[in-house]
Image: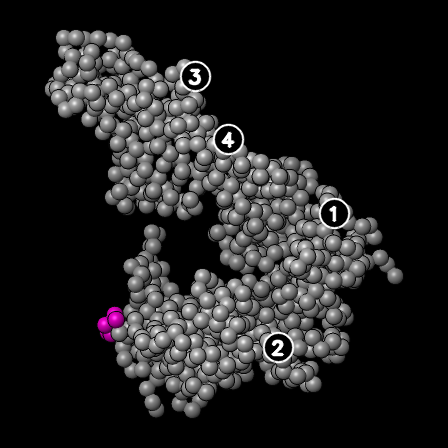
Amino acid sequence: MKRTFAILTANPLSLLGLILVFVVVFSAVFADFIAPFPEHSGAVVDFANFNKAPEWPYIFGTDLVGRDLFSRILYAYRISLILGVVVLAIAVPIGVTIGLVAGYLGGRTEYLLMRMTDVFLSVPPLVLAMAIMGVLKPTLANGMLAVTAMWWPWYTRLVYNITRGEKEEGYVLAAEVIGASRAHIIFREILPNCVPAIVTKMTLDMGFVILIASSLSFLGLGVQPPTPDLGSMVADGAKYLPDSWWLTIFPGLAILVAVFGFNLIGDALRDILGAEQ
Amino acid sequence: MSTPTLDIQDLELGFKGYTGFTQVLHGISLSVNPGERVALVGESGSGKSVTARIVLGLLQELRTAKISGSVRFEGRELDQMPRRERHALRGKAMSMIFQDPTSSLNPVFRIGEQFHDVLRRGDAKITRADALSRAAAILAEVSVRDADRVLNAFPFQLSGGLNQRVMIAMALANEPALLIADEPGTALDVTVQAQTLHLMRKLVEEHHTAVLFISHNLGVVREFADRVYVIYKGRIVEQGPTRAVFEAPRHPYTRALMAAVPRLTGGGIPDIDEDSPDFAAPLEIHQDGGQS
Amino acid sequence: MTTPILELENVSKTFGTGADEVHAAQSISFGVTKGECLAIVGESGSGKSTIANMILGIYPPTSGEIRLNGTVLPTRRQLEHRRAIQLVQQNPLSSLNPKRSIGASLRLALDVHDIGAKGERADRVGALLEEVGLPANFARRAPAALSGGQRQRVAIARALACQSQVVVLDEPTSALDVLVQARVLKLLNQLRETRDLTFVFITHDLSVVRNIATRIAVFEKGRMVELGDTQTLFTNPTHPYTRRLISAVPVVTDEEAALRNSLAAGLEETNE
């Protein structure tokens, strides 16, 4: 742990990543306490103060119904992080398990599982998500379902490749000679050796999940108003550029901060854990 | 006494890591005279391989490496040479062969092309045709009869023994003054290894090449080297002519090494202490004919 | 004549089909007596690893039978077969899972074969470590924290964990330093005696074999060319390949060189 921290703080870029991610997570968790106008995350209107450029107390300005942009961004971070965590929490176990089983068992099983994975991988990710959302009602939950469906195959691919290499290693042979069950070998012997690569990818993915979710909302397929969402805010505000620039720029920057921060940490983690990708 | 081809004095090497500074070489000194075959014998972690890499200038680029001491090649201090000059020595005046011949050759190029690259270092303008005919001549010297087939092949298509000979041939192609051999033959079958060593001996004698031979295999060293330096944990603990050191080892570490090698004549496995404090005893030098 | 504990009868193994067929082992037959150390020597392509793998049940023979205590070993090995024959591999680094502690790797054998009561398995692991000359508290360490020699001792402890009868050792000391090798070989000799084990010792190193094997089987290109007790094989080998092998061994003393020369007498130099 000490070594991890030393490496993370030694490199200025990874330090920056740490700071950015900390800011995002802190905002999401403590939005209720930091936001100057916590109620503005909901269905509130204040036409007296609508469309105001950044000025005290509206530090990022207000939107077209008078809500404080800064507060809404903080709450939007919460939505994004929840979405990221839920998507990964479901997609990763599914993808990893399929990859492990296909990689170790080989033969027919490998063929069937990996060809199925290939099918999912061959559809452009955003298109797949859009297709799913086109069929289902646009809610946060369905948005998460759509993104999960397109996310798991990448973990399958990753873990499959690692497993194929690891299964030639001596410790796998040793376990086989001892008579360990296949389930033991897959989950207790090989999986721990995949963890560095998986964790690194998950960290990098947090940024990308947020980006994809924002893209979906931008297209109107994500969460619905009045729930604050970074992508929707960018979409709504885009029409009013360059006059009401704050409507788009600040949510856009917020997305940038989150994605960039997670990317930087993911890179650093890759170096620390020596992950293969 | 002529200038030694390679003269190392008080070489020290340490690495800076996250946890602190690790000293790997504690001031070693050794020399190789023209035409001489000198072995550097030690176990893993003794520092023998990094010594070779320092001579070739392969470690100096590393930011975490701290090197001090003198390394002289044909009388000239390598440290003080301009980078380009030092780089020019590699492959021409100094060359190296490695432990696993098949993985040391580039798998995506045919042997002929790799020979051409090697010969180009000696003569930048050499044509492909000339290079191939020279290569065939050199291959004949290493007893490769089917030169055409070999030159047209990729390394993975040839056996380990053949690749080893190719590597030796390439290393000697530009008539280097110094050849560094890092555990050659270790990856080979014992019969092939014996042939390879015999061949190497013949060649370096013919070309009057000085050889620094790095190994952990005492039997191979006994057969190949004129003089021996025994290295333990970054220090030379015993040195002298091969015969003298093998017949009457003085340093506790050398004696332990000799005793630990299983004998073809039998006798069982002796009781050996892997890491005795006696191993820290000072250097033992066998003098013979003024060589040291 | 007691039944050999392990017996191979006309065992052959062919890999691939048609033009790509490789006859890795051809009609191999030998028996191993309980308590002995049978060495299988040969160079690459000799088939020695193939034989070891078939004994261990990694893949079945193409033809022929392998018998343990008189009963034929099936293609799909059951737990009791696995328990009876264990393996020590060449590479101490790769044979231990880098992400699991030494103790966990040792416990696996105990858990799979349900040896001892669950609560006392940790103690058994400690006892195994001590038996191979390592402190019991090494159980908590990761393989990376151990030296090559120490790891190999752990691998040996693992092979002993399920109280096997036969241990196949595939070049167990080839990757170790000289001093470490001597210690590990001594340990193996001791363990064979104290535990009444039977060793099948695969190696290319004839000097090692001279000092630990009771009998030696010499393999060349998939065939067994000679089988005899150690003393006889080294003083009076019958097959020319055996002579070639012995005369190629690098030696450290003049006596050994003399032995080599006397055995090499009459062999022509063959080039590759």
Q: Is residue C262 visible?
A: no
B116 or C186, which is in the foreground? B116
- Structural distance between the alpha carbons of marks 4 and 3: 22 Å
Q: Name the amino acid, label 3.
A: Leu
Is B225 rendered above or below residue A249? below
Residue under the image location 28 percent in, 35 percent down:
A260
Q: Name the amino acid, label 1.
A: Thr
Choose top left, top right, bottom left or bottom right for residue A187.
top right
The residue labelled by disc 4 is A94
Q: Which circle's residue, 4 or 3, is located before the other in the chain? A: 4
Residue B6: image location, x then y, percent: 35, 80
**Mainly helix, strand or loop, the magenta region?**
helix
The chain containing the residue under callout 1 comes to C
- Structural distance between the alpha carbons of marks 2 and 3: 76 Å
The residue segment tinted magenta is B79-84
Depth-wise, is mark 4 or mark 3 nearer the camera?
3
